[in-house]
Amino acid sequence: MSVFSPLALTQTLPFLPLAQGDIDYQVERREDPDLFVSVLTAPQTTVMLVDGGRIAVPKGQGALTEYENVALRLATLPGAYVLPELATHPQVVPMFLGSYGGARDEQVVAIDVTRLPAATGTASSGVPDSAFEGADDAFGATSGSGASRRPHAAASLLQQARERFDWVDLRGFAPHASSREAGQATTAATLSVWHMRQRHCPTCGAPVTAAMGGWAQRCTNEDDGHRLLFPRIEPAVIVSVVDAQDRLLLQHNNAWQTTTMYSVSAGFVEAGENLEHACRRETREETGIELGEVRYLGSQPWPFPASLMVAFKARALSTDIRVDGEETGDARWFTRDEYTQALASGRVTPPVKAAIARYMIEEWYGHEL
Ligand SMILES: [Zn+2]
């Protein structure tokens, strides 16, 4: 896992799990009609799988996301086996994620199997048996699944893969993954969730098809000009607030499942609002605190389902906390000693490792949580 993001030249937070990718998108190739044929037949191409925003990992790794100090990696399939499946399964969405090092021999494709139908056992798949043996861990002798779990012969390679791999949430995967694979997974999950949720053109209601290497959709209605549609990203601000004594303002939201979790203020940017205004408004709404200077810390995508978290650090002009008791259950100022004691006693727990809030708190705290 890399310590410094390539983005750290412009941001204060040096490590953000979902913002570490360094892949070259190669945007200019997205309109190539033969894109997936050329990419999937290249021997060094890596193919990963995504299903409704969840990421495929080798069998057995799915149970590891809750552990400390474990390494997770993406399950992969050979591109040559996947290519014929695109013809037999028009419901799957191939997504060209880009290439490393500018060369074409380290290309990455994600296959979105969200709408892949379950194997029925009646249709012939046309996939040779040897394919079942060649596809990474899911089909290996050490998978532990045994002969009784071997899927029906009619199941295609992708249908088998969906059964044989483990599937994990991006929040569980990214903190344990290499920076490159975390970046790939973040993009794939973001696009997968968008394709899952948007099946029709928002303007005319006609069905859409995937376009631009999976990064866009095209409206099928000729009268609507076959409109090209792009994912909507929802910006949200998140603010760490300190007072004149460098105490940090942390609050508990009543909607959070973990009753001891305290975090910094966050909220969606409203229509017609800029980021700084959103910081001031959200902090005032949640804690009653007025903000002075606001400066940028960094950002990371948060595709649950479509947010971009934009982080700021702000200085409070006041210290008198007022919470509504409904959305915000509690808010407090912490010195570093008080925060250390609160963590040690278990009265306060920090945000999860994937969340930018955790790294904002660490930036103030001075070391890792
Ligand atoms: Zn349309």
Image (cartoon, helix red, strand yellow):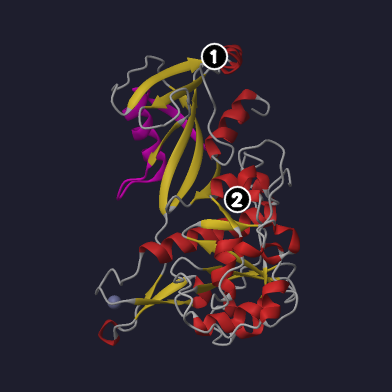
Name the residue beneath numbered marker 1: 245
Contact (Cβ within 8 Å) of mark 2 with mark 1: no
Q: Where is residue 322 drawn, in percent x and y?
A: 32, 18
For the C terminus, the quadrant is top right
Q: In the rendered structure, which segment of residues is drawn in magenta? A: 268-296
Judge whether residue 296 can be spotted in this image: no
**Label ID, residue 19:** 2
Asked if the beta carbon under badge 1 is closer than 8 A to the nearest atom of ligand 1, the reply is: no
Asked if the beta carbon under badge 2 is closer than 8 A to the nearest atom of ligand 1, the reply is: no
- As rendered, which of 102 and 89 lies closer to the eye? 89
Does residue 293 belong to the magenta stretch? Answer: yes
Q: Residue at x 62, y 67 (%)?
A: 150
Q: Residue at x 56, y 85 (%)?
A: 32
Please rate how many residues cluster around mark 1, counting C-alpha atoms within 10 Å: few if below 14, some from 14 to 19, many from 20: few
Q: Residue at x 75, y 68 (%)?
A: 101
Disc 1 residue type (three-letter): Gln
Disc 2 residue type (three-letter): Ala
Q: Which picture quadrant has residue 117?
A: bottom left
Does residue 92 belong to the magenta stretch? Answer: no
Quadrant observed for ligand 1 in the rendered image: bottom left
- As rendered, which of 181 and 66 lies closer to the eye? 66
- Looking at marks 2 and 1 on the same chain, the residue that comes earlier in the sequence is marked by 2
Q: Where is residue 114 drawn, in percent x and y?
A: 46, 65
- Kindly report the distance in space between the C-alpha atoms of the residues bearing marks 2 and 1: 31 Å
Instruction: Look at the numbered disc 2 and give the secondary structure of its residue.
Output: loop
